[in-house]
Amino acid sequence: MSYSFGNIMKQAQKIQEKIAEVQKDLVNRRVEASSGGGMVTVVANGKQEVLSVKIDPSVVSSQDVEMLEDLVTAAVNEALRKSQELISEEMSKVTGGIKIPGLT
């Protein structure tokens, strides 16, 4: 085989640099999820950070706080799931689909 250890290390370094670029880019990527037919909307970034929560005023009722809590929880969980999916997709592009522990 014509692969030398030096060539493998250069390739690994290139992949590492691309991964760093993708991770930096993911901070600026956004995903959005909603629950309750759009009554609660959550925006998260590619670093698994919730950036905003929007609540339709019609849902705010002191009589039904539990429903609102459930809607917020559902929207946050869906936004974080979408964020993780975004991370996996972007990292897969860099790694050629190879699963590297700690990256996805």
Image (cartoon, rainbow, N blue to C red):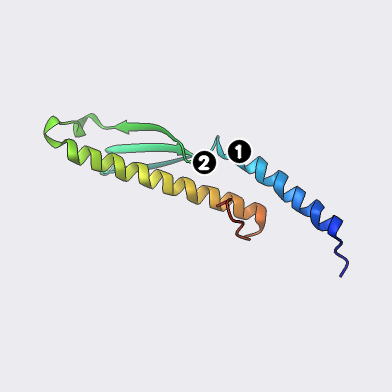
Q: Position of residue 2 (x, y in %)?
A: 88, 66
Residue matched to label 1: 25
Q: Is residue 101 left or right of residue 82?
A: right
The foreground one among 104 and 26 is 104
Nearer the N terminus, badge 1 or badge 2?
Answer: 1
**Element type at mark 1:** helix
Q: Is residue 6 left or right of residue 21?
A: right
Residue matched to label 2: 46
The N terminus sits in image quarter: bottom right
Q: Kindly identify the residue that appears in the image at 36 percent across and 41 percent down.
A: 76
Check the image and report above or below for 76 versus 60: below
What amino acid type should be assigned to the residue bearing mark 1? Answer: Asp
Q: Position of residue 12 (x, y in %)?
A: 75, 53
**Element type at mark 2:** loop
Q: Residues within 10 Å of mark 1 (few under 14, many from 20)?
A: few
Q: Kindly identify the residue that appears in the image at 85 percent across and 64 percent down.
A: 3
Q: Is residue 40 left or right of residue 83?
A: left
Q: Residues within 10 Å of mark 2 (few under 14, many from 20)?
A: many
What amino acid type should be assigned to the residue bearing mark 2? Answer: Gly
Q: Position of residue 64 (x, y in %)?
A: 14, 37
Q: Kindly identify the residue that appears in the image at 63 percent across and 53 percent down.
A: 93
For the residues labelled 1 and 2, say whether their Cβ atoms are less than 8 Å apart: yes
Q: Kindly identify the residue that appears in the image at 52 percent across and 48 percent down.
A: 86
